[in-house]
Amino acid sequence: MTINQRIKNELNIRGWSQYQLSKCTKIEQSTISKWFQAVPTTPSQRSIKKVAKAFGMTIGQLMSEETEADSQFQELKDFWHRLNQQEKDSVLNMIKTIVSHR
């Protein structure tokens, strides 16, 4: 996975837009959008450092193939498959409530 794909993955996990990342990092939104074009540019080390900080990660964690978020997501999936439908509905409602109160 490239650093561009890692950043996109982390944006998706957090539900962030490129605009939100731009605001958090003070990196021009046009620069960020170039990272995700058909022929992407590679973020500079300085940009990677800012992005990692915005995500609350180290540069190593951001560049790693497996992040804490990935392992947590896998653990969540493992537990999810053990639930019955009523329990799944309850968990989804709880998550929706938490997210709506941010």
Image: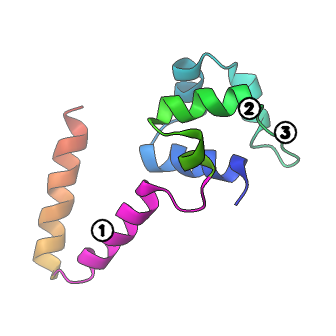
Q: Secondary structure at mark 1?
A: helix
Instruction: Give the quadrant of residue 81.
Output: bottom left
Q: Position of residue 33 (x, y in %)?
A: 73, 33
100 and 73: which is toward the camera: 73
Q: Is residue 70 magenta?
A: yes
Q: Amino acid at mark 2?
A: Gln
Write the residue at 24% across / 31% down: 102
* Quarter containing the N terminus: bottom right
Instruction: Give the quadrant of residue 75.
Output: bottom left
Q: Position of residue 37 (x, y in %)?
A: 80, 43
Say the numbered circle drawn on residue 41.
3
Q: Secondary structure at mark 3?
A: loop
Q: Secondary structure at mark 2?
A: helix
Q: Nearer the viewer, mark 1 or mark 2?
A: 2
Judged left or right of residue 58, residue 89 is left
Crowd rating for badge 3 (residues with CA inside 10 Å; few <14, some 14–19, many 20+): some
61 and 75: which is toward the camera: 61
Seen in the picture, residue 15 relative to 45 is either above or below; the reply is below
What is the span of residues highlighted in magenta in the rendered image? 64-83
Q: Amino acid at mark 3?
A: Thr
The rendered magenta stretch, by its main secondary structure, is classed as helix
53 and 89: which is toward the camera: 53
57 and 92: which is toward the camera: 57
Judged left or right of residue 22, residue 69 is left
- The Cα–Cα distance between marks 2 and 3, rounded to whole angstroms, is 12 Å
Judged left or right of residue 41, residue 98 is left
Residue occupied by mark 1 = 76
Residue occupied by mark 2 = 45
